Amino acid sequence: MHELRGRTSSGPVSFCVSLNQGLDRGAGTRYGRWLVIGVIASISVLVHAAATLLGAESPSRAKAPPESIVVPVLMYHHVREPGPGLSDAASLRYAVSPIEFEKQLDYLKQHGYTTIDSRVLDHAMRTGEPLPAKSVMLTFDDGWETQFSIVYPSLKARGMVGVFFVHTGVIGDEPGSAMSWADVCQMEDDGMDVESHTISHPSLPRLEPDALARELADSRSILEAKLGRPVTALAYPFGDFTDREIDATRRAGYRIAFSTEVGLVQRLDEPLEIHRTIVTFSDTTDDFAIKLTERDGGRALLDYRPSITPAVRAASAQ
């Protein structure tokens, strides 16, 4: 049987002996061994408990909350064939043919993507909770009639949701180049997400403060009256905004706002600066696939004019 030993200046000394002086050698030795084992076991339990407690409370061991989420937010405008007002290379950057649009939706379906609306993204941005696997948001700007007659049926047939940013000044009782209020309400009733794109689609940084406030607040209140529910998302016209517009958007009651800055990374501390990736007439299926996965949006930069936002911020920093 092994024996615990220590060392003194006079040489090895048995702990068992030193702990059991005056006891019967056989019984005392057994008693001493069990005493030592008990002490060691108690110390081990205490050390383990302390380590567990420290580990639970240590900030370095705690899982850090996410600073961003990665989700493609795709931006569409016209979904129609070239024609009047949509024939040169510049204008076709804002268009996708109906045939290609159908192919893109089928690609998303075949590759397991889940379309989400603005409320789902807003919740994830504010809580840090994960989005559904392979989430993607499909956004459509300006309220064009073809978004009702072509886009909406294509989405509905596949069980998908789209987010439609309409500027309320062009929506009327009858459809024309823009959809009607009946169209807007039908899409909303069928599960689409209709949100604000201001009243008249101005470049917001160029407006006086009162006009800016009206564009943001009145478009929101008009939509809420028509839809019967809170409207909390905005797309900046032309993608133009500065810190002043962010503050005004927040004061107007919006919780989330969309830019034209490219990339898939959405910072949780910037819910009013959501990045979007434009889809254009020239995109092949391979281009489309790249835009779904390219975090910095480099491919999309080739397609879309930069908004004035970076230039305005750079000037104000000087």
Image (spheres, rainbow, N blue to C red):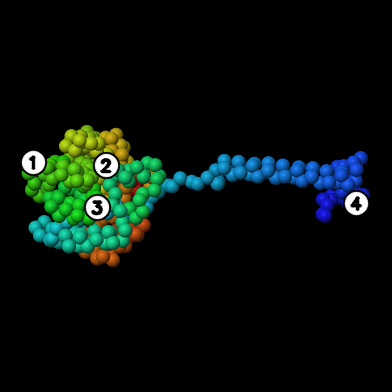
Q: Which residue is mark 4?
A: 11
Residue at 28%, 47% (x, y): give it.
117
Q: Tell me the quadrant of the picture where the C terminus can be found.
A: top left
Q: Which residue is mark 3?
A: 160
> Which quadrant holds residue 105?
bottom left
Q: Are marks 3 and 1 in contact (CB under 8 Å)?
A: no
Measure the alpha-carbon separation of dots 1 and 2. Answer: 24 Å
Measure the alpha-carbon separation of dots 3 and 1. Answer: 27 Å
SS class, disc 3: loop
Residue 173, numbered label: 1
Name the residue type under label 1: Asp
Q: Is residue 210 above or below residue 260?
A: above
Residue at 59%, 44% (x, y): give it.
55
Which numbered disc, 3 or 1, marks the residue closer to the eye?
Answer: 3
Name the residue type under label 3: Met
Which numbered disc, 4 or 1, marks the residue closer to the eye?
Answer: 4
Q: Position of residue 267 (x, y in %)?
A: 38, 47
Q: Position of residue 270 (x, y in %)?
A: 36, 44
Q: Is residue 138 visible?
A: yes
Categorize mark 2 by other alpha carbons within 10 Å: few (<14), some (14-19), many (20+): many
Q: Which residue is mark 2?
A: 233
Q: Nearer the viewer, residue 105 or 245?
A: 105
Q: Earlier in the sequence, mark 2 or mark 3?
A: 3
Name the residue type under label 4: Gly
